[in-house]
Amino acid sequence: MYRTKMLPSDERSIDEAAELLRRGEVVGIPTETVYGLGANALDEDAVRKIFTAKGRPADNPLIVHISDMDMIKPLVTEIPELAYRCAEEFWAGPLTMILPKSDIIPSVTSGGLDTVGIRMPSHKTARAVIKKCGFPIAAPSANLSGSPSPTTAGHVFNDMNGRIPAIIDGGFSAVGVESTVISFENGAIRILRPGFVSAEDLKEITPDVIIDKGVVAQLEKGAIARSPGMKYKHYAPKADITIIDASLDAFRAYVRNNADEDCVCLTFGEDDCEGLNVRTLCYGQTDAQQAHFLFDRLRELDEIGAKKAFARCPSKEGVGLAVYNRLLRAAAFQVVTLK
Ligand code: TXA
Ligand code: MG
C-alpha cells in the first residue's frame, strides 16, 4: 500500500516524479490525451508494477513514450518513410505508431509481441518528466483495467489511491480520448484505434488509410485482434448504456417511450431532453467537445448511481469516430438505429 501523493505540476514535482521513476516506481502523469500510468519502459520490474496497479492482462502491450526524436532509434529496428512523415506532421501529439521492436524493449512492455507502440506526447509536463529521466516511459491510461480512462488527476486518484506513490495534477486533459494507434503495411496506414488525429488527417499523408474492422465492430469469436486492447471490455461504467443512433426528434421520441425513472440520458446539449421527465448529462455539441468530456461523463454516471442510460450517437466522422469507438465499448455494442 502506498500513501498516494498528489503533486502540483511544477519543476519540483517533475524532479520528484523523475526520481521515483528512476527507482523503478510507477507515477500518474498528465498527457494531452488522458492521464498515463508511467514507468521505465526498459525496466521489467517497473513495468510489471503497472500491470499490477491496473489489473491489466499481461498480453495487452503498453505504449512507450519519448520526449525527442533521438530517443526512438534504439527502440525499434525499422522506421518506414511513412512513419517519418507522420512524426513530422503529428508529433508531438496524440498519435501512436506501431513499429518492429528492438531487443532493449522487454517483452513484458510489448505484451509478448515483436512490435512496440511509440508516442511523443505534447503535454509539457509529460515531456519534461521523460526528458528528465532520459529513458522512455511506458504508460497505459491510468485507470483500473476496464474503467473509463482518466482525464483529471482526481479520476486517477479514485482508481489508483494506495496503488502508486504519486500523481502529478496537470489539469483536465485537453483531448480527452486516447491517442490514435496506427500500423504500417505495404505503404498503407491502418488505424487500430481512432483518436484525435483522424482518418481524414492521416489521408493528407497517404490516401491509403484503412480503418481496421475492430474499430466499429465486435471481434468475432476466435479472431486474433491486431491490437490486443480491442478484445477487452472497456470504458464501462456500471450503467447499462444503449446508443440511440437517431435525429434529435427521434431520440426524444425514443426516450419518451422507453425511459423509466432510473434512466439517465447522455445528450449533446442541456435542452436535448427538455420537457421529458429524465435526468440528463450532456457531453458536448462538437466532436472535439464530446471527446473532451466523454470519459468524465461516463464516470459521473457511476457517481450518480445510474442503472441505465440512453446516449445520443456521435458523428462517426473526424474525431467523432474516436468518440463513437469508446462509447460503443462503454455500451457493450448496444445500438438502436432509428433512421
Ligand atoms: O493516449 C494514449 O495513448 C494514452 C496516454 C497515456 O499516452 N495511453 C493509452 O494506453 O491509451 P493504453 O495502454 O490504455 O492503450 C494502448 C492501446 C491498447 O489498445 C493496446 O492494445 C494498443 O494500444 N497497443 C499497444 N502496443 C501495441 C502493439 N505493439 N501492437 C498493437 N497494439 C498495441
Ligand atoms: Mg487504456
Image (cartoon, rainbow, N blue to C red):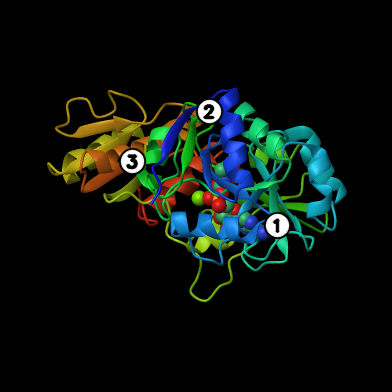
Secondary structure type for disc 3: helix
Question: Distance of mark 2 from mark 1, alpha carbons?
Answer: 25 Å
Type of amino acid at the residue the image marks with label 2: Ala
Residue 315 can be seen, yes or no: yes
Residue designated by label 1: 116
In-front residue for pair 277/167: 167
Q: CA distance from mark 3 to mark 1?
A: 30 Å
Asked if ligand 1 lies within 8 A of label 1, the reply is yes
Q: Position of residue 203 (x, y in %)?
A: 73, 40
The circle on residue 15 is: none
Please tell me in which quadrant of the rendered image residue 270 appears: top left
Whichever of callouts 3 and 1 sits on the residue coming sooner in the sequence is: 1
Q: Looking at this view, is 339 or 94 the one in front? A: 94
Q: Secondary structure at mark 2?
A: loop
In this rendering, position of residue 316 left or right of residue 202: left
- Residue at 41% over, 55% down: 146
Q: Quadrant of residue 312?
A: top left
Q: Tell me the number on the disc at residue 299.
A: 3
Q: Position of residue 234 (x, y in %)?
A: 43, 54
Q: Earlier in the sequence, mark 2 or mark 1?
A: 1
User: Mark 2 highlights which residue?
Assistant: 174
Q: CA distance from mark 3 to mark 2?
A: 17 Å
